[in-house]
Image (cartoon, rainbow, N blue to C red):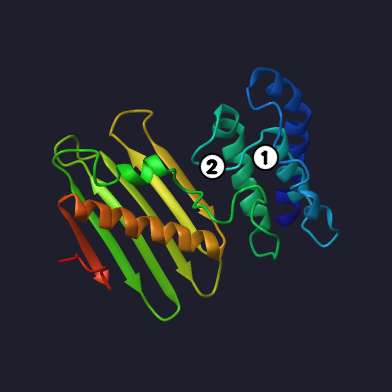
Amino acid sequence: MQTRQTLRALSLGVLLVCAAPRLARGESHSASTQAGVCDALQDPSVTPGLHGLCLTYCEALDCDHPAEAHDSCETAGVQILADYEKLREGTTAPAMPCIDSDVCPCWSAAEIAAIGATWTPSTAELISQTAVDWSLTALYEVGTGVSVDAFQIALVEIPAWTAPVCSYFSTDGTEGSVESRDLTITQAQAQTCKTQLLEQYAALLALGASVGCEGDPCPPRGP
């Protein structure tokens, strides 16, 4: 199984590196700002295939944030990042090097700010669960006045026994409106994701929005 994953990753990396000049000629992102960022993945101890995927994602396509990507990243880049994460699973290989460790890569600032402020009426809620070796923080909104299928959620799960993950999903109920991301992230990124969710919850409360909280502990609602 691991061999097939490695070969698939290598094939995709070679294919897209070869296609990079064509992509660059048609995109405004033709000059990469990520040169050299993948060099550490050339080490013999690193899983084969990761370096090629990194070169394609970071240098050929010049991607650096899955949720704030230009056209090439939104198409080819999504699959490359998914293949990279799958290939490095269970290894000590780093997350995609060109994704800033101080940002939450699952959603953009605009997407997180929209949760709880998109539909009227709607139901919005923060879910906050914390245990000794695990935590889950999620913020969601359901557009009850628009469509039972109008829904958006952002969450981060931080277990002690494996790497953290963040997820984002949104749809307004119409065909083609689904946006979905699931990423394995670093501890620093996980804390940034969690902070952004709590800050958006606090911002909704400050605006007088109707937003609930389920879990233990729930952040204070203020005076």
In three-dimensional space, the C-alpha distance between marks 2 and 1, rounded to whole angstroms, equals 10 Å
Q: For this view, does 97 lie left or right of residue 184? A: right
Against 15, is 219 above or below?
A: below
Dot 2 amino acid type: Pro
- The numbered dot on residue 105 is none
Q: Secondary structure at mark 2?
A: loop
Residue for badge 2: 66
Q: Quadrant of the N terminus?
A: bottom right
**Left or right of 215 in this view: 157:** right
Q: Position of residue 68 (x, y in %)?
A: 50, 38
Residue that protrudes farthest toward the top in the picture: 26
Left or right: 2, with 159 as reference point: right
Q: Residue at x 65, y 65 (%)?
A: 90
Q: Amino acid at mark 1?
A: Tyr
Q: Quadrant of the C terminus?
A: bottom left
Q: Residue 192: give x, y in percent of width and height.
A: 46, 59
- Viewer-proximal residue among 13 and 196: 196
Front position in the image: 132 or 221:
221
Residue position marked by numbered label 1 in the rendering: 57
Sooner in the amino-acid sequence: mark 2 or mark 1: 1
Viewer-proximal residue among 192 and 45:
192
Residue at horizontal 57 percent and vertical 61 percent from the top: 186
Q: Residue furthest right?
A: 44
Q: Position of residue 219 (x, y in %)?
A: 26, 68
State which quadrant residue 26 falls in.
top right
Q: What residue is at 82 percent from the left and 62 percent from the top?
A: 45
